[in-house]
Image (cartoon, helix red, strand yellow):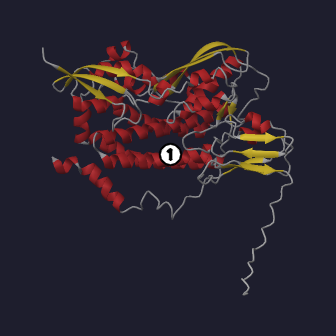
Amino acid sequence: MLSWSIRPIAELVLRNVRRQPATRLYPRERRSPFPRTRGQIAFRIDDCDFCTICAHKCPTQAIVVHRIDKTWAIDHGRCILCSNCVEGCPNGCIRLRNEPHPPLRAHEILTFRKGYESPPPPPPVTVEPPTAG
Amino acid sequence: MANTTLVPFGPQHPVLPEPIHLDLELEDERVVRALPSIGYVHRGLERLAEHYDFIEMAQVAERICGICSFIHGQGYCQGVESLMGVEVPPRAAYLRTLWAELSRIQSHLLWLGLAADALGYESLFQHSWRIREQVLDLIEETAGGRVIFGVCKVGGVRKDVDAELLQSVRQRIGTIRTQFAEITRIFTVDPTIQRRTRGIGYLSPEDAHHLGAVGPVARGSGIARDTRTLGYAAYGELDWEPIVEQGGDCYARCLVRIREIDQSCELIIQCIDRMPDGPIEVSVKGKRPQGEALFRLEQPRGEVCYYMHASGKKNLDRFRVRTPTFANIAPLVHMLKGCELADVPVIVLTIDPCVSCNER
């Protein structure tokens, strides 16, 4: 009775022993995202005319656009990847990338500013060796 | 008269994925009365519909529940479309059917895994979820999200699925079906499962009808009650019959869900073979919903009703959802009377309680 009762599951388990594992060794082996996966919102400021349509269409108010300061900011922690902004953007500045956004370590808002150039790296600090006397 | 003991069951319990509380009145080990109480995950989403734009609300409706997400979005969109007098193109209706059936398969496989776990069958639990993972991959590949599909919108669907991807889905659904057949055999012949489920939690067809059971609970008691027979989306054009089992016990409800997975695979293959060409959405610009109506859809757990009232504004005046779990709580309380305490987890699980839907 016992040998018969465990037969179907035993067969399945034995067959699976010979198969490849169904899981991945995650941190070492990662699955590439599918082409359609909603990963994160990517923004390109060059063509943006700060019309604020994206900010109005955002259901979670994750996007904040400032017309006068010419800034465009997104809070990736609030974004639900609905792609309303992608569909609403008249200039095609916003698109949806398939790589997921890396986990945020703190609450941060990514801000873009028109004509902003990153500052030059600070000059290396040289310290004169103390002179004797 | 024997002394009665009051045993609280839930809201935190190993078999419950979501919080529901039952006060069980016991005489020795036998349950004489069960008193359910709900309200642990209420979020007030129905009230949000009175503030949100009716187009944005489709995304909120999809977030009512994580397991039945697509069908909530579909029900909301179909409701608003009919209040606006818009008819979606046939391709959109077929795509909605395809995604709704994928959603049903993943929900039932999730349930089968949880049921196996509740019965103490952990290897079967892992096998069910291994197959479910492949279905989730199909969902992500076609829609873009694993849990929240995000493809249903008022007026149609957001994404089209090209012929190549459809053929790939068709082929992989065939593979999933073969793998699932192995598991089905264990569920149907294994004596451990039979002993834990046969004759447990019996619900007669009359009781199921009078208590208003829906979905697999009603169909497991021999009532052919399936809202898909109304023919919404593309169901009117596909060849299928509601699945009915006569047992009325936990085993019959388990069998209904197993057979429904196979039926959903068949419906997906039919959908892909008969997929019409054409646009996937119609423009709803400038249109506003007006009037009052009630819509019914079939979720994995049973019939869900949406009541909507709109008066031509940008938001709905009233939005109300009657979910299948709410309808199935009355039959659950009836089933629990007279059962053993050890059988309570299995009986509670066979109604497939989805508490997030239930409390919104």
Is residue B276 depicted above or below B179 in this figure? Answer: above
Total label count? 1
What residue occupies the far bottom of the structure in this picture?
A132
- Residue positioned 30% across, 32% down in the render: B345
Where is residue B327? Give x, y as percent: 42, 19
Where is residue B181? Give x, y as percent: 38, 45
What residue occupies the far front of the structure in this picture?
A133
- Residue positioned 79% across, 51% down in the render: A44
Is residue B203 visible in this depiction of the protein?
no
Is residue B212 depicted above or below A9 in this figure? Answer: above
Is residue B353 visible in this depiction of the protein?
yes
Residue under pointer 1: B135
Taking depth in this image into account, of B244 and A78 the one nearest to the observer is: A78
- Residue positioned 45% across, 25% down in the render: B302
Where is residue B84? Give x, y as percent: 71, 19
Where is residue B326? Give x, y as percent: 43, 21
Badge 1 marks a residue whose secondary structure is helix
Quarter location, residue B19? top left
Q: Is residue B166 left or right of residue B187?
A: right
Q: Is residue B152 left or right of residue A71?
A: left
- Host chain of mark 1: B
Quarter location, residue A17? bottom left
Taking depth in this image into account, of B285 and A14 the one nearest to the observer is: B285
User: What amino acid type should be assigned to the residue bearing mark 1?
Assistant: Val
Taking depth in this image into account, of B110 and B36 the one nearest to the observer is: B36
